[in-house]
Image: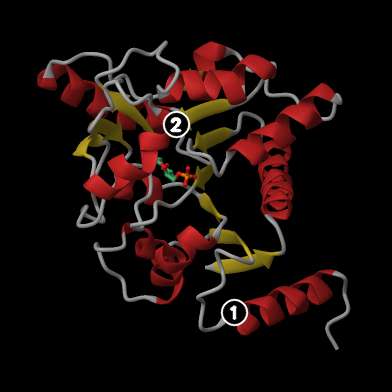
């Protein structure tokens, strides 16, 4: 794991945007894994700004989102499809047919299961994901892989935990149906990505971040499995990093890594 600690959420978004652009320019037909939630919004804003400034095109990019709610339509304001259209896809030159979000509008479990299996097949057919963007839930979930999810799980239906439903309540109106089921990429699916970039900001993520980076590998903190990924970058703001025991060491490593890159290591 490469742990990068930066002063503010804005710095986290800028650093993440640089990493996304690095991947995009190195590949002819890049495949990005995308996340929703409030954390990646600043990253998407930055990518949109770079596109509007003529510095970034999404024409060759294919995307796969982590998850989608079951029980609301695609055009519902809180569906992850509309989230992605609103914050990224409608604002850049991406071909919408190259964007994928799990198909979760059916209420038939057989159809949903079939869609989930098909989703993994589509990712494979695209050649796999080059860079997967992740956020983290306060209970350590990634995508909607809640605590006790299998580390080798594939894309499937998951029941959301009470704490996740409570955390996401803020997005729904008081009298509105709030989904408690979702289709999510499995942890095994996520781990197949060639690189992973997880962002976390704010004090409320500090405990999950500590469990992810310094805790034991445990399905009680699904994100802890990222310790086993060969190329996982964790970008944190000061608050999200505030409970880390080895915080000074991670800061030291980054300083030294930058010196090495500048050819200035002795
Ligand atoms: C949802 C998403 C996750 C996201 C999490 C945290 O549960 N399925 O992918 O990481 O929310 O969201 P936020 O960034 O709003 O804290």
> Taking 152 as reference, is 230 above or below it?
below
Task: Out of 73 and 17, give the one closest to the viewer.
Answer: 73
> Taking 6 as reference, is 52 above or below it?
above
Side (left or right) of 32 relative to 6: left
Q: Residues within 10 Å of mark 2 (few under 14, many from 20)?
A: many
Residue beneath disc 2: 65
Q: Which element is circle 1 on? A: helix
Q: Between marks 1 and 2, how big is the CA–CA gap?
A: 31 Å
Return the x and y of residue 47 as percentages of the image width and height. 71, 33
Residue 18 is marked as none
- Mark 1 vs mark 2, foreground winner is 1
Q: Residue furthest bottom?
A: 266
Return the x and y of residue 229 as percentages of the image width and height. 44, 62
Q: How many marks?
A: 2
Asked if residue 51 shows in the view, the reply is yes
Side (left or right) of 240 relative to 140: right
Q: Quadrant of ligand 1?
A: top left
Q: Quadrant of the C terminus?
A: bottom right
Please give the name of the residue rendered at 66% of the width and 42% of the height, measured from the top-left corner. Answer: 20
Residue beneath disc 1: 247
Please give the name of the residue rendered at 64% of the width and 83% of the height, measured from the top-left corner. Answer: 248
Please give the name of the residue rendered at 32% of the width and 32% of the height, measured from the top-left corner. Answer: 120
Side (left or right) of 110 relative to 168: left
């Amino acid at each position: 794991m490469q742990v990068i600690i930066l002063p503010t959420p804005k710095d986290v978004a800028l650093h993440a945007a640089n990493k996304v652009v690095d991947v995009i320019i190195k590949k002819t037909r890049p495949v990005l894994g995308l996340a929703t939630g409030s954390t990646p919004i600043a990253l998407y804003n930055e990518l949109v700004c770079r596109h509007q400034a003529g510095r970034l095109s999404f024409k060759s990019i294919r995307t796969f989102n982590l998850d989608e709610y079951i029980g609301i339509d695609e055009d519902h304001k809180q569906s992850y499809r509309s989230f992605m259209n609103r914050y990224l896809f409608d604002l850049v030159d991406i071909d919408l047919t190259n964007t994928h979000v799990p198909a979760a509008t059916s209420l038939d479990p057989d159809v949903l299961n079939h869609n989930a299996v098909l989703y993994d097949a589509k990712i494979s057919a695209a050649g796999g994901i080059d860079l997967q963007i992740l956020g983290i839930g306060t209970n350590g979930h990634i995508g909607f892989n809640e605590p006790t999810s299998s580390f080798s799980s594939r894309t499937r239906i998951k029941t959301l935990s009470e704490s996740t439903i409570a955390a996401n309540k803020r997005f729904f109106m008081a009298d509105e149906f709030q989904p408690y089921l979702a289709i999510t990429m499995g942890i095994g699916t996520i781990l197949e990505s060639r690189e992973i970039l997880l962002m976390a900001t704010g004090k409320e993520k500090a405990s999950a971040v500590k469990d992810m980076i310094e805790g034991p590998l445990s399905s009680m903190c699904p994100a802890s499995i990222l310790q086993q990924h060969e190329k996982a970058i964790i970008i944190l703001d000061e608050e999200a990093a505030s409970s880390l025991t080895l915080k000074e060491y991670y800061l030291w490593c980054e300083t030294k890594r930058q010196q090495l890159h500048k050819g200035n290591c002795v």
